[in-house]
Image (cartoon, helix red, strand yellow):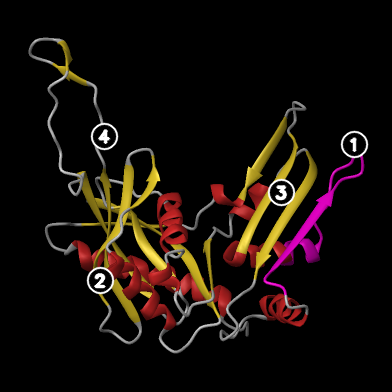
């Protein structure tokens, strides 16, 4: 059985004309611009099918730019000055991963593990943030926000200290044309009312005391799971100070499938659909 995993980013555009998310992805793809995300690792959107009115799908690829003047000859077992001349447009170690981008919920879901190789959400996040700054991509799209979608279970871990000394919560403006549960709507309306795009809350404990998160703090933190970030600090049972971040808890869906009977594309789409249902459950009005 082959294991696959998916993770997701929440992509929001303010303000956005009709088909803004389709335009964004199309422009990114047509820019044909690899982005350096770490060391010699680059990422690019390498295929795109956006004919469906509800979603786009395709491949996001990871590859390596080999730049070296220092080579080792394993036959002679000595340093060599006669390394290969690699054309600047050629990259090595190509790995491709499937993605689907749902327009309604503006969620970009991708294979974070395809059974053989992995794609870090940090790489995808940096790619989107960097490529969105290109004039050819951002033209007419005034402000683009990207957030990792975090796991609901991570909240308990974030607050789990023997002595909780600090909580920082950042809430970015949710998309205005989505119908949200009351708690998301409240923060959306508050930010709109004061003409702000971001709200930050900081809670510091009384010396030698532990913060007791109330419903208001938990409410803020739940919204930040999709539209923001959370960091906490405190002391464990041994008196050691530790810090935690919601970035440590990406929402991850995983499954196993028989590659002999199930096409990988079908397995990924099934898993992405399951993930979207869970994400949409956070956004839809609560009964």
Mark 2 or 4, closer to the camera: 4
Residue labelled with disc 2:
48
Residue receiving disc 3:
159
Q: Residue drawn 49% across and 77% down?
A: 141
Q: Secondary structure at mark 4?
A: loop
Question: Where does residue 156 sit, x and y in percent of width and height?
Answer: 66, 52
Question: Is there a contact, CB below 8 Å, between mark 2 and mark 1?
Answer: no
- Residue at image position (51%, 83%) is 16
Tell me which label, 3 or 4, sits earlier in the chain: 4
* Front position among marks 2 and 1: 2
Q: Which residues are magenta?
A: 196-219
Give the distance between the C-alpha atoms of the residues marked 2 and 4, in whole angstroms: 29 Å
Mark 4 vs mark 1, CA separation in Å: 52 Å
**Disc 4 versus disc 1: nearer the observer:** 4
For label 3, the SS is loop
Q: Earlier in the sequence, mark 1 or mark 3?
A: 3
Q: Quadrant of the C terminus?
A: bottom right
Q: Position of residue 260 (x, y in %)?
A: 11, 57
Q: Residue furthest top?
A: 77
């Amino acid at each position: 059985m082959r294991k696959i995993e998916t993770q997701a980013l929440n992509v929001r555009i303010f303000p956005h004309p009709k088909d803004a998310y389709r335009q964004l992805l199309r422009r990114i793809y047509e820019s044909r611009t690899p982005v350096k995300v770490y060391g010699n690792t680059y990422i690019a959107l390498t295929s795109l099918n956006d004919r469906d009115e509800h979603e786009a799908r395709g491949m996001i690829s990871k590859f390596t730019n080999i730049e070296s003047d220092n080579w080792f000859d394993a036959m002679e077992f000595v340093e060599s000055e006669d390394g290969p001349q690699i054309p600047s447009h050629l990259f090595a170690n190509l790995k491709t991963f499937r993605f689907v981008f749902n327009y309604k919920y503006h969620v970009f879901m991708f294979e974070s593990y395809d059974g053989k190789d992995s794609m870090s959400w940090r790489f995808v996040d940096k790619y989107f943030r960097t490529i969105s700054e290109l004039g050819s991509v951002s033209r007419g799209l005034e402000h683009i926000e990207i957030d990792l979608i975090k796991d609901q279970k991570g909240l308990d871990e974030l607050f789990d200290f023997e002595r909780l000394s600090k909580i920082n919560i950042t809430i970015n403006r949710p998309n205005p044309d989505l119908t949200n549960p009351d708690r998301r709507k409240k923060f959306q309306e508050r930010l709109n009312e004061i003409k702000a795009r971001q709200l930050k809350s900081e809670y510091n404990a009384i010396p030698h005391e532990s913060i007791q998160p109330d419903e208001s703090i938990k409410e803020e933190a739940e919204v930040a799971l999709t539209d923001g970030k959370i960091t906490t600090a405190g002391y464990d049972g041994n008196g050691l100070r530790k810090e935690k971040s919601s970035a440590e808890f990406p929402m991850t869906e995983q499954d196993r499938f028989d590659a002999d009977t199930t096409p990988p594309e079908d397995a990924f789409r099934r898993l992405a659909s399951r993930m979207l249902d869970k994400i949409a459950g956070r956004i839809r009005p609560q009964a």
